[in-house]
Amino acid sequence: MRFLLLIFALGIFACEYTPAKLPILGERDFVNGDTVYHTVRPFSFIDQDSQQVTEKTFGGKVYVVDFFFTHCPTICPKVTKQMLRLYEKYKDDSRVLLLSHSIDTRNDTVGRLQEYARNLDVSSKSWHFVTGNSDSIYSIAADYFSFAKEDAESPGGFVHSGQLILADKHRRIRAFCDGTDEKDVTRFMKEIDVLLNEKE
C-alpha cells in the first residue's frame, strides 16, 4: 500500500514539476571538443497562403510542430483543439510559431489548408499549415522523433503520432507532449515558457 501511495505521489509531482532548463533531446556527437546536437534538417514546404516555408521562417523562433490531415476521423480534432490553445496564448508573441504538416498531400491542397485555417480563425503570421512532397513530410517527421505514413488499414488511410513537439531556435528538439491530453498540454505550455526564458 505504501508503495502504491509513493508511486501516486511521484506521479503528481512529475505532472506538476517544471524544470529550470529543458534538456536537448536526441543523440549527440563530439567534434573537435564541441558537442553537436541532433537538429531538424533544412526543409521547404508551402503553407495555406501559398508562401514558401523553410527553416529560415523559424530562424530565431521557438516553434511547436504537429502532423495531421484535414479529414482525419480520429485524433486530429483533439490535437487541433490543443494547438488552438497554444495559438491563443502565443499569437501575439513574435518569438513563437506553430507548424502543422499535412500528411495527406494529395487531398490537403493549399486551398483546402486555407479553408481549414479560415474555419479555425487563425493567421499564418503565427500558425503555418503546410503541404509538399509526401516523402519529405514523412521523413522529416522522424527528425522530430515522430512518425507519419500511409496505412490503408488505419481510419482515414494514415497513421501518425498525436504528439506536439517543441523545437528551439536552432531546430533542436526540447520537449514533447500528448496533443490529445489537455493536462499534458498545460504542462507543455510551462515548458515553452521555460525555453523562452532560457539564456544561452
Image (cartoon, helix red, strand yellow):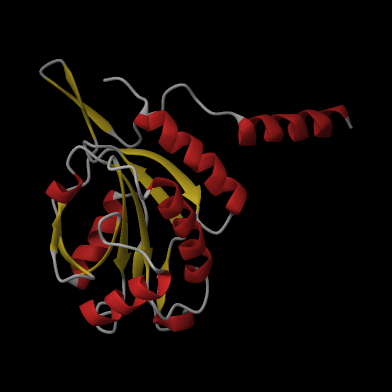
Judge whether 156 appears above or below 16 on screen.
below
**In the depicted structure, whether residue 143 falls above or below residue 70:** above
Where residue 80 sits in the image (x, y, percent)?
A: 46, 64
Which quadrant holds the C terminus? Answer: top left
Q: Residue at x 50, y 25 (%)?
A: 19
Most foreground residue, 143 or 22? 22
Left or right of residue 109: residue 92: right
Q: Position of residue 193 (x, y in %)?
A: 43, 33
Residue drawn 23% across and 37% down?
A: 169
- Seen at 42% across and 23% down, the residue is 21
Query: Which one is in front, 165 or 85?
Result: 85
Say if residue 71 shows up in the picture. Answer: yes
**181 and 6: which is toward the camera:** 181
Extreme residue in the top direction = 33
Pick the front one: 111 or 42: 111
Quadrant in the picture for residue 71 = bottom left
Q: Quadrant of the N terminus?
A: top right
In the rendered image, which quarter is residue 12 located in? top right
Relative vertical location of residue 173 with respect to residue 36 in this rendering, above or below: below
Name the residue: 48% across, 81% down: 155
Whether residue 153 is visible, yes or no, is no
Q: How many marks?
A: 0
